[in-house]
Image: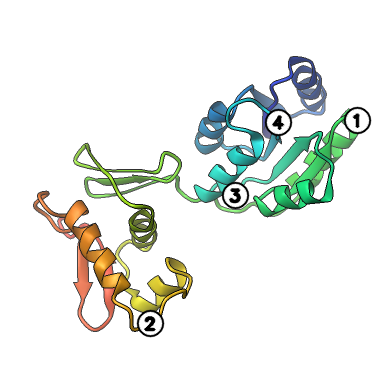
Amino acid sequence: MKLLLLEDDDATRTQAARQLAAAGHVVEECRNGPDAIFLATQGDYGVLILDRMVPGIDGLSVLKALRAAGVRTPALLLTAMDGIDDRVEGLEAGADDYLVKPFASAELLARVTALSRRPPIAQELVVSTIGDLTLDRVKRTVTRAGKRIDLQAQEFKLLDYLMRHEGKVVTRAMLLENVWSFHFDPRTNVIESHMSRLRAKVDRGFGQELIQTVRGAGYRIDDLAR
């Protein structure tokens, strides 16, 4: 099985990688958060092993970014923080298991093996593309025809949801539940106002309109020119 190991301590990383490799695993090593995010979103790993306390982007933030990007690879957090609140925080961030340092190599191997037995979960796309429109969930960027489009946080969530349902009608109720979590009165015009601003940014000036209003039903995003 191919494993990704994020650990900034050379001695710990080398020892763990050696033990895992001796058990037949292929171990890809990295020392910092940005490299871990890049590798985890590009590679096909069976388990992610993430040290929580690394400089810069820490392991917990790496995990949150990966889960937000739709990466569902089983993840084991390594940490010297053994408080209940620390463990709860790690599990709520998307960790599947938690191993406190210092740890025995045999226990690390056993926990990785246990995680590998879980049924595989399909990894969602990090990048979605419709026509010349591209949305990157890790970089949190949107471009069309190579031109960067700056969106507010809620506009990004709205476009993300539409692109995950490409070609399908998305109703107001679906948007209220999944983009706004029903925090608003269903009679509100919040959807219309955000959709208007989103369409102005995504479609205006690009010729073909990708976002369409489906009368009496909702909205749909599609590349009708295909």
**Camera-side mark, 4 or 1:** 4
Kindly state the secondary structure of the residue where label 4 is placed: loop
**Along the horizontal axis of the image, is 127 left or right of 91?**
left
Front residue (pair 186, 172): 186
- Residue occupying the point 34% across, 62% down: 162
Residue placed under numbered mark 2 in the picture: 186
- Residue occupying the point 88% across, 31% down: 103
Disc sitting over residue 104 in the figure: 1
Kindly state the secondary structure of the residue where label 2 is placed: loop
Q: Relative to residue 96, is residue 172 depicted above or below?
A: below
What is the spatial separation of the Cα atoms under label 3 and label 4, in whole angstroms?
Answer: 21 Å
Disc sitting over residue 53 in the figure: 4
**Camera-side mark, 2 or 3:** 2
Q: Quadrant of residue 31?
A: top right
Q: Residues within 10 Å of mark 1 (few under 14, many from 20)?
A: few
- The amino acid at mark 2 is Pro
What is the spatial separation of the Cα atoms under label 4 and label 1, in whole angstroms?
Answer: 18 Å
Q: Residues within 10 Å of mark 2 (few under 14, many from 20)?
A: few
What is the spatial separation of the Cα atoms under label 2 and label 3, in whole angstroms?
Answer: 32 Å
What is the spatial separation of the Cα atoms under label 1 and label 2, in whole angstroms?
Answer: 54 Å
Sequence-earlier tag: 1 or 2 = 1
Percent position of residue 41, x then y: 51, 38
Residue 1 appears in the rendering: no
**Camera-side mark, 1 or 2:** 2
Percent position of residue 14, x then y: 76, 17
Tell me the quadrant of the picture where the N terminus can be found. Answer: top right
Sequence-earlier tag: 3 or 4 = 4
Residue placed under numbered mark 3 in the picture: 72
Q: Residues within 10 Å of mark 3 (few under 14, many from 20)?
A: many
What is the spatial separation of the Cα atoms under label 4 and label 2, in whole angstroms?
Answer: 43 Å
Q: Are marks 1 and 3 in contact (CB under 8 Å)?
A: no
